[in-house]
Amino acid sequence: MKKIYQALCVSILLLSGIPLVARGAPEVNENHKIIKIADEVPGLITPGLYDGAAMSLISSVYEYLVEINTDDGSIQPVLATDWYTEDGSVWTLHLREKVVFHDGSEFDAFDVKYTLERTQNPTVGHLRQKDFEIIQSIDVLDSHTINIYLKEPRPGFIYNLMDYNIAILSNEYDYGKFGETRPMGTGPFKLDTLIPKESVVLKKFDHYWDNELPKVNALEIYFISDMDTAVSMLEQGIVDVVPFVTPLVKKQLETKDGFKVESPYQEQRFVSMAVDKKPFDDNRVRLAFKYSMDPHIIARSIAQTELNEGVFYDESPIMNMLSEHKELPLRERNIDKAKQLLREAGYPNGVTTELYFPSDHPFSKELAQSIKELAAPAGFTINLKGYPRDVYLSQYWLHVPISITGWGGRIDPTNLLTIAFTSDAPWNELHMKSATIDELVHKASMEVDYDTKVEYFHEIQDWFYEQGGLINIQVPLLIAMSDRIVNYRQSLTQITQYKYTDKK
């Protein structure tokens, strides 16, 4: 089996509160271009521990073996120039030559071996440990050729290599000591200055392996937790790009000259019920909650649109844009049935619970309010607990009875399922431990025949529909920017490809 290709179906602004770097001098001339970005506040930024916030930083400093072509959905080379496998059990990768890290050291096969073996280092606590425990051994054949031997076939293993936590690291650099303050990779931009949780300046890496990239001289990134402030910065020309805006902001900017809003793909808002915590440890309560929802009202309230016109509703974790998705009947709202289920579960007077969510993440606040109001007539008293996304993720996420979390998609569904829904998944919001799901995910990850693999995914979705504690609201990822920004690219893997982006 040669290279695997898969098409994707796929406020008033108080200047005293903005980082000093954001007030920097204007660009000198058109040959010295700077893109300025108001991004999310990140948590940890060391690959392996990174939670996916402020992708502009990570995806510009670090690189991956392969990436997604945002035009046609194919896999294209980055640090790996080509790859080969016969049956998915042994993978041969040829690596790009004449690549250097930002510290001047040369990139070679030992760096790839180090990066992959690091996933299994217990002192790291790598978030993709489970995905890569399938590796039996890694042989360095020469300085730029590597064989990866798997314990059993994984026809989709190549997709694991483009996860944002599998950035290629130098085996000579101490990421445990410097990863949070001096991130260092082979990426198109090199760290200049970093003020944690506040701002970062990245400058064009003069020794980048592609002489034509990047297109601009620097990125200035300001970590702004308040969307109104970020949008005001965009309107005043202080920044050029604001990721993750709402439909309301989109409509606001569409009436003004000089701005545009692009939507690279759909992302997800998982409404997750912890199945090991009362009251959601009883499937009848989970079903009652789902019967109290109205997908049409949710779409209109969070995005001012009709269902299936930019907003989609499902009860499985597999996005409807993927070919593995199974169309299941929309569960119509039925308050009487919801009340009956609660009575059968021993809650004749209803239940009280707390819904946690990132209050500064687009769609989440509106979704939380809609859920609270829709569930009330069925007997659910829901107290809303909203926190800034960095606080939510670091202090509450994974430890609460019900939550709303933003999730990016994955091209191969098994990549998401293994990190979020199997018994030992590190990001298991539902606290699931289902032998059925574990077995089906394992079978799907091993299966070579596509039709058979899809059957396993359909069984998984049937299970979630009947027993799962998940509602999946798919919403458009909206990126607001100056119309001077050209060729903004962001793939379904969530990686922002600023190396291709230019500024007029």
Image (cartoon, rainbow, N blue to C red):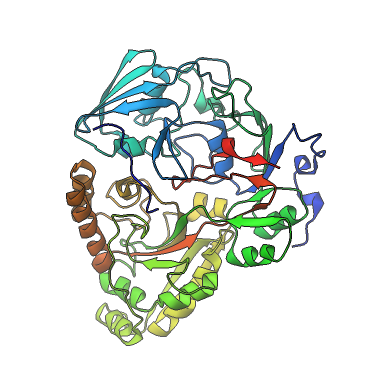
Can residue 125 be seen here? The reply is no
User: Image quarter for residue 375?
Assistant: bottom left
| Above-or-below relation of 277 to 433 | below
Q: Residue 485: give x, y in percent of width and height.
A: 66, 46
Front-most of 408 and 9? 9
Q: Is residue 356 left or right of residue 90?
A: right
Residue 492 position within the rendered picture, expressed as x and y whole percent measured from the top left = 44, 48
How many marks do you count on the picture? Answer: 0
Q: Name which quarter of the figure residue 273 lies in.
A: bottom left
Give how far across and how far down residue 196 sits, in percent: 64, 38
* Rendered view: 146 above or below 262: above
Nearest the eye: 160 or 172: 160
| In the image, residue 148 above or below residue 283 | above
- 375 vs 175: above or below: below
Write the residue at 42% across / 45% down: 72
Quadrant of the snapshot with the C terminus? top right
